[in-house]
């Protein structure tokens, strides 16, 4: 029997801290943006928002779409599917047996 014991050590961390932004429910949804903000948007941005798409966007700095500069250049968006997702096919979670050739 071969056994190895290793003590826990700090290592590299790849996760970025969650930014301090409003929660998605605190932001205007796409319907509210269409009613309140879309008439103020430049034409190319308005055309983008008028297209149907499979995801819902909740933009934190939506003043950017109105042509206003954001001081630190950061742009935060919450994204989720706008409808129900299809069920995961069983083959996605299954392993295929390997046979030697």
Image (cartoon, rainbow, N blue to C red):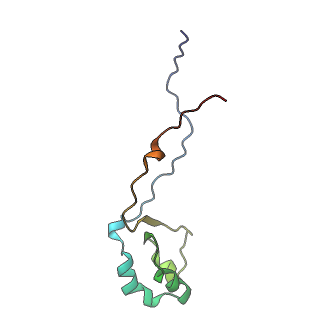
Residue at 36% of width from left, 66% of height from top? 24
Farthest residue in the right direction? 101
Farthest residue in the top direction? 1
Residue at 51% of width from left, 17% of height from top? 5
Looking at the image, residue 20 lies above or below residue 50: above
Side of 8 relative to 23 (left or right): right
Query: Dividing the picture into quarters, in which one does residue 71 lie?
Result: bottom right
Looking at the image, residue 18 lies above or below residue 24: above
Q: Position of residue 43 (x, y in %)?
A: 53, 89
Side of 29 relative to 91 (left or right): left
Front residue (pair 1, 78): 1
Front residue (pair 55, 87): 87
Count all numbered tags in the image, as a single digit: 0
Looking at the image, residue 14 lies above or below residue 82: above
Front residue (pair 50, 73): 50
Residue at 45% of width from left, 70% of height from top? 54
Q: Position of residue 57 (x, y in %)?
A: 44, 70
Q: Position of residue 12 (x, y in %)?
A: 57, 39
Looking at the image, residue 52 lies above or below residue 6: below
Front residue (pair 47, 10): 47
Q: Position of residue 47 (x, y in %)?
A: 51, 85
Farthest residue in the front direction? 101
Side of 22 relative to 17 (left or right): left
Q: Which quarter of the rendering shows the C terminus?
A: top right
């Amino acid at each position: 029997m071969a056994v190895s014991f290793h003590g826990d050590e700090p290592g590299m961390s790849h996760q970025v801290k969650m930014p301090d932004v409003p929660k998605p429910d605190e932001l205007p949804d796409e319907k509210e943006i269409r009613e309140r903000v879309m008439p103020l948007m430049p034409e190319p941005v308005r055309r983008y928002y008028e297209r149907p798409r499979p995801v819902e966007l909740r933009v934190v700095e939506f003043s950017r779409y109105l042509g206003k500069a954001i001081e630190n250049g950061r742009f935060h968006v919450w994204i989720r599917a706008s409808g129900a997702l299809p069920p995961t096919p069983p083959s996605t979670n299954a392993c295929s047996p390997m046979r030697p050739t």
